Amino acid sequence: MAKAATAGEAKPLGIYVHIPFCRSKCEYCDFYSLGGGRNSELMRDYLSGLLQHIREAAARAPGYIVDTIYFGGGTPSFYGVSNCKRILAEIQRRFHVAREAEITLEANPDSVTPRGMHALVRAGFNRISIGVQSDSDEHLRALGRPHNWEQARLAVENAKIAGFENISIDLMYGLPNQTREGWAKTLRSALALQTQHISCYGLKVEEGTPLYEYRDCVNLPDDDTQADMYLYAVSTLAAYGYQQYEISNFALEGYASRHNLKYWLGGEYLSFGPSAASDFAGKRYTYRADLQTYLKGLRGGENMLSECESIPLRERGGEYLMLRLRTAWGIEETEYQSTYLMPFAPLEEKLREYAGQKLAFRTADGRWRLTPQGFLLSNQIIGELLEIQNNSHPIIRT
């Protein structure tokens, strides 16, 4: 086990575990996962590999306290409750895990049972994220989702009965043949579930997915309609007490995803599994998106990294702009200049232009953040700010 740090010296750390198995691949999914049902031998090999990797990594992480753990995928619930329990137990055994750590498992409604949820809670999972996506069975079929609305509703209800007090659901808008009215109905159905957290993602048609091949034949809503759906979600969820703390994420007070905030606010995280990325001890590295390569790498026979680099200070400053402007916290002059030694004035000049266009605003405590309309154009806005930063000269301390 990694040496436990004292409270005064402990550095917080998030752990992400990628589970690359699914019952079937959704039409839109471009995450690394293996669809097509169960392969018991491969699943056993992966469990052995993960447990080995966790042991080895923990030995290199003294002085850290793990305050968030996240099982994502793929479909962790499809991998099986017993496997997920063993992985979590190994993390708890090898790392110093905070008593109040947030421990999340992603689940699909078709692959999690009431009994399984009770077992997850007893094992220490205290947050569950359920992939609902829509209340329309027609839309779910079009996406290739392996569940229906009734299964999704029951999954949320069963999670509450099992003892989960922090439940998140994922929704998608901009679906084939989806109307504004249909999206409004999905939101009403979602709100009736009374979960603590709701994520709303616009459908993106990614190259290499099945949906990309027939994208012109499925009557996708245009950009203006998607924008209307997004803004409607922002205003509707706010009316029901869900605070928007990131472009796509909304939570009741106190229920923002602490793990995902590590990504957006620049915290350290250590990840396991093919395609998983880490930002740990000053380095950024990612494992190859191939399960066999990952397993061979653990046995010492193959390089399993697709990238590994130390991030220069200027690039870290760019990440600060890119990630913080996705959130309700936004960016701030002293924070930026003192940490990344880059001038804020050129950025603020541009931000004032955005404010005049109702795309950004300055808060009472001096932070700059984007409006919901600004979030819609965040890629463009952040790109322009990054260009300004790249053309700026570092601050020289004397």
Image (cartoon, grey):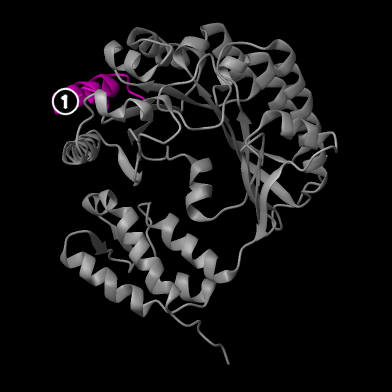
293 vs 60: above or below: above
User: With 249 as the anchor, is 13 left or right in this view?
Assistant: right
User: Mark 1, residues whose alpha carbon is within 10 Å: few (<14), some, or many (≥20)?
Assistant: some
Q: Which stretch did the figure color magenta? A: 175-195
- Residue 311, percent across and down? 61, 63
User: With 389 as the anchor, is 77 left or right in this view?
Assistant: right
Q: How many labels does the image show?
A: 1
Q: Residue furthest right?
A: 300
- Residue 121, percent across and down? 58, 19
271 vs 331: above or below: above
State the quadrant of the N terminus: top right
Q: Label 1: state its secondary structure.
A: loop
Q: Residue at x 39, y 76 (%)?
A: 344
Q: Mark 1 points at which residue?
A: 179
User: With 259 as the anchor, is 298 left or right in this view?
Assistant: right
- Residue 201, percent across and down? 34, 35
User: With 225 as the anchor, is 216 left or right in this view?
Assistant: right
Front one among 382 and 232: 382
Q: Which residue lies furthest to the left in this view?
A: 181
Front one among 93 and 209: 209
Q: Which residue is drawn at 44% across and 22% down?
A: 130
> Magenta segment, principal secondary structure?
helix
Quadrant for residue 198, please give it: top left
